[in-house]
Amino acid sequence: MTVRELQDKIIELKKKTNTAILAHSYQAREIVEIADFTGDSYKLSVDATKTDADNILFCGVHFMAETAKMLSPQKRVFLANKGAGCPMAEQMDKELISQIKAQDPERTVVAYINTTASLKTVCDVCVTSSSALKIVRALDNDKILFIPDCNLGSWVAKQCPEKDIKLLHGGCPTHAALTVREVQKAREEHPDALFLVHPECVPAVAELADYIGSTSGIMDYAKKSEHKEFIIGTETSIAEHLQYDCPDKKFYPVTKDIVCRNMKLTTLPDVYNSLLGMDNGEAFEILMDDKLITDARKCIDEMIRLGG
């Protein structure tokens, strides 16, 4: 079966099962093409609340599907590949942060959206990479514990010198692995290109950027810019998607090694088999009890209240 034939079967099945397919921007092109919604993790969860579909099939990683379930508890939410986790989301747990809160109770706990539902239950407010700066500035409390990504937290702290921001060692291993030397080499090879980078990269790399922003921010900047060449400092699939969307421009991954292995676990056959298995128990459904949803949603609701 060809990719196109399998895509056509998926399109037919999602209509038959009344399913909306959500694909994170790091997914492969053939998955993005059959998705009803694409974008960052939080945007997709919001998109899920706006669709009339009974079922949500998330092509991403586990914490993202959890967030979609929290915001749409009345819908069935499935993860296309049950093995797709997130190393950053799993670095810290509820017990660790509870202990730190007990030792330093005056701090407001700011949790990056890339955290588990369990961890969110002991956090005060959630943020995305695009809303982190705005929300931290909006907090009444100047004493903050920012988790889990110390690189994103460091970038926020630099923009908010008036805040006392405590960081823990954690973050995205894929973005954190990008080095200054790799950026310099890419600039030497493409001297006319602007360097666009995600704030999950280490501060020394971020300092070399012409633009720092979330995945969607990077894509929007590149699409709207009059510039014609860009070095993309985030997951390699973003350079690929941008090349499709803007064929008149040139996009270069800063290195071929910025690949999220968990995102790449999801395949087109996974999507197809999930649609087939929704009613016989073979698809991986996200199941959360009411208390977990209620407790974990508090920090997301606070993010929404603060304009995130």
Image (tube, rainbow, N blue to C red):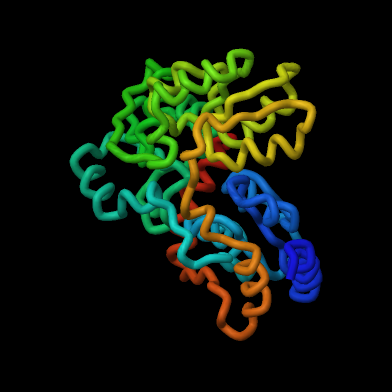
Q: Is residue 171 above or below residue 183?
A: below
Q: Which of 272 and 136 lies nearest the eye of the viewer?
A: 272
The residue shown at (40%, 43%) is 124
Is residue 74 at all visible to an observer of this figure?
no
Left or right relative to 76: residue 145: left
| Quadrant placement of the N terminus | bottom right
Q: Which of 231 and 143 lies nearest the eye of the viewer?
A: 231
The residue shown at (70%, 55%) is 30
Q: Is residue 196 above or below residue 91?
A: above
Is residue 209 at all visible to an observer of this figure?
yes
Q: Which residue is at the far front?
A: 189
Residue 21 lies in what quarter of the image?
Answer: bottom right
Q: Which of 306 and 12 lies nearest the eye of the viewer?
A: 12
Please provide percent x and percent y for residue 222: 68, 26
Please provide percent x and percent y for residue 275: 67, 73
Please provide percent x and percent y for residue 236: 56, 39
Q: Is residue 223 above or below residue 272?
A: above
| Quadrant placement of the C terminus | top right
Q: Which of 25 and 267 lies nearest the eye of the viewer?
A: 267
Q: Is residue 23 above or below residue 154?
A: below
Q: Which residue is at the far top?
A: 191
The residue shown at (53%, 65%) is 81
The residue shown at (29%, 30%) is 166
Left or right relative to 98: residue 240: right
Left or right relative to 258: residue 216: right
